[in-house]
């Protein structure tokens, strides 16, 4: 069967990022100072981020130019391909037309490099010598390690402990690119030592790792903090994905009826759907389906409230769907989705019913991943496999109804470093984790009181 691949030329690669803020149906609630409860000003964030990224965080400009030096590095892997999943369609026996935008061809193996390169560039411009960050499954840590190597910055990565042991080759990749990697919670920070004193075997969480990275940055004069998801400027940099996908869907002569992607902090899927979202806001008949794990379902079972982005309560307060900043999710293999909160932009669009959400279990996710790998040949990471599961569900609904819908899947990266997880699944050792209702209820009781 012929493979259909839609490729843009380098000349067609986006030269500007798309900023959704001026197109939102209602203004995005501002981040608040954790001490005063008042809206943050640029000076409040300057200790952690370079000023250019702070400007992008609140920019009213719909289009923000991508500096030429960033564009040059993007050309190492961009534009990325859009595939028509003919073999998957045939395997499912569906009339649906399935397309997937594949970000796994980047040097770091995922979409994360789109913002890593941009963030390191702006830090370098401001004279920063070192960056501290957290990573869940390791995709973000890998991307930042490589971007720091490109620009000559040092990189310290606090890797969630469960993933540190599940995915050792991600650590090796980061170290090969020059980063120093420690399991979180660690002995390197007050935040880490406090958690370890309470639970020496803590599996860690992105909230804990963020606390450690923020503390590291705040305690070193030459260091800034870098975040791989959640914040507005991170989602902004990822819109190159959706801008390309929109052109490629035009090349295919089709427009999506449904766009599906996984969400943890929200950057991968938001980068894909945000360039389409204004069409939806303006009345286009389009469904945007966010898929999260049942073990960490911030949109489907969390609450919309101001909360800290980290466990130690060092970050600004963000209005988002959250399971509570002290929530520690189970040790699922989709480490990049083990975050207690959701990006404010994604949360806002979900609250306004512009996007929808569904949660799926781990076993069903890997079943879908194997189906996809056997049909299309690409081994997907556990994170986007959540979206593959729902894409298959949507395609099977079309099989039942006879509808010939067009489905666009955000495939954020490959699973070559996740073979241990696939081994557990194929050998029957992988288990589902139930939503820990009581733990989340307890964590939600600790939400900050905001007027």
Image (cartoon, rainbow, N blue to C red):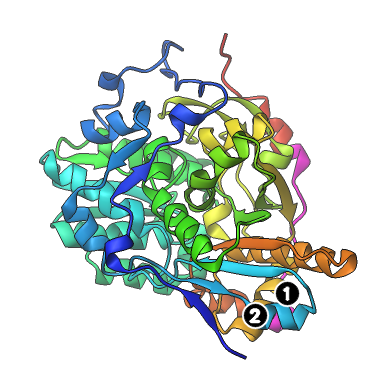
Query: Which of the 4 image quadrants contains residue 442?
Result: top right
> Which callout, 1 or 2, points to the residue nearer the camera?
2
Residue highlighted by disc 2: 86
**Above or below, 293 relative to 251:** above
Query: According to the image, label 1 marks what residue?
Result: 367
Q: Is residue 96 left or right of residue 143?
A: right
Residue 109 visible in the shown view = yes
Question: Mark 2: few, some, or many residues within 10 Å (few <14, many ≥20)?
Answer: some
Q: Where are the magenta residues, as a range? A: 425-439
Residue at position x 49%, y 41% from top? 207
- Counting from the top left corner in percent of width and height, residue 166 is at 52, 69
Q: Quadrant of the C terminus?
A: top right
Q: Residue drawn at (25%, 20%), measured in percent from left and top?
A: 43
Residue nearest the observer in this picture, 185 or 347: 347
Compare marks 1 and 2 and give the one earlier in the sequence.
Answer: 2
Q: Quadrant of the N terminus?
A: bottom right
Task: Check the image and report above or below for 28 versus 195.
Answer: above
Residue sticking out furthest to the front: 253
Count of residue discs: 2
Task: Give the prevailing secondary structure in the magenta stretch.
Answer: loop
Residue lying at 34% horizontally and 48% vertically, measured from the top left? 133
Q: Residue furthest bottom?
A: 1
Q: Which element type, helix, strand or loop, lies under badge 2?
A: helix
Q: Is residue 126 placed above or below 159 in the rendered structure? A: above
Residue 66 in the image: state x and y as whole percent. Answer: 25, 47
The percent coordinates of residue 387 (x first, y second) are: 65, 60
Label 1 – label 2 distance at C-alpha: 19 Å
Residue 62 counted in the magenta span? no
């Amino acid at each position: 069967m012929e493979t259909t691949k839609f490729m843009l030329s380098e000349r067609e690669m986006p030269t500007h990022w798309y900023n959704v803020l001026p197109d939102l149906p209602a203004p995005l609630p501002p981040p608040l100072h954790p001490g005063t409860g008042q809206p943050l000003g640029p000076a409040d964030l300057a200790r952690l981020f370079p000023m250019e990224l702070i400007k992008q965080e609140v920019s009213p400009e719909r289009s923000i130019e991508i500096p030429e030096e960033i564009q040059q590095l993007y050309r190492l892997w961009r534009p990325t391909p859009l595939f028509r999943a003919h073999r998957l369609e045939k395997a499912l026996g569906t009339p649906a037309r399935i397309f997937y935008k594949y970000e796994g061809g980047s040097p770091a193996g995922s979409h994360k490099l789109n913002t890593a390169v941009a963030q390191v560039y702006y830090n370098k411009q401001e004279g920063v010598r070192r960056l501290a960050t957290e990573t869940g499954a390791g995709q973000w840590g890998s991307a930042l390690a490589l971007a720091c190597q490109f620009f000559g910055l040092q990189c310290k990565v606090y890797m969630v402990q469960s993933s540190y042991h599940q995915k050792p080759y991600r650590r090796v990749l980061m170290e090969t690119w020059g980063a120093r990697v420690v399991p979180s919670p660690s002995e390197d920070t007050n935040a880490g030592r406090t958690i370890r004193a309470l639970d020496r075997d803590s599996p860690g969480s992105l909230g804990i790792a963020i606390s450690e990275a923020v503390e590291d940055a705040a305690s070193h004069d030459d260091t800034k903090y870098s975040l791989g998801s959640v914040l507005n400027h991170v989602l902004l940099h990822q819109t190159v994905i959706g801008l390309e996908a929109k052109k490629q869907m035009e090349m295919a002569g089709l427009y999506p009826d449904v766009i599906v992607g996984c969400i943890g902090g929200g950057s991968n899927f938001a980068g894909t759907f945000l360039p389409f979202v204004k069409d939806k806001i303006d009345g286009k008949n389009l469904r945007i389906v966010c898929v999260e794990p049942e073990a960490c379902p911030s949109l489907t079972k969390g609450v919309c409230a101001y909360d800290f982005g980290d466990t130690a309560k060092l970050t600004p307060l963000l209005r988002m769907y959250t399971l509570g900043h002290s929530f520690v999710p189970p040790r699922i293999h989709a480490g990049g989705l083990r975050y207690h909160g959701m990006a404010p932009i994604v949360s806002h669009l979900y609250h306004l019913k512009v996007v929808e959400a569904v949660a799926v279990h781990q076993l069903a996710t890997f079943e879908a991943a194997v189906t996809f790998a056997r049909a299309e040949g690409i081994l997907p990471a556990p994170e986007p496999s959540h979206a593959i599961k729902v894409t298959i569900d949507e395609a099977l609904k079309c099989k039942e109804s006879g509808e010939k819908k067009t489905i666009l899947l955000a495939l954020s990266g490959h699973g070559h470093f996740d073979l241990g997880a696939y081994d557990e699944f194929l050998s029957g050792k992988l288990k589902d984790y139930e939503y820990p209702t009581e733990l989340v209820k307890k964590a939600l009781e600790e939400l900050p009181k905001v007027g």
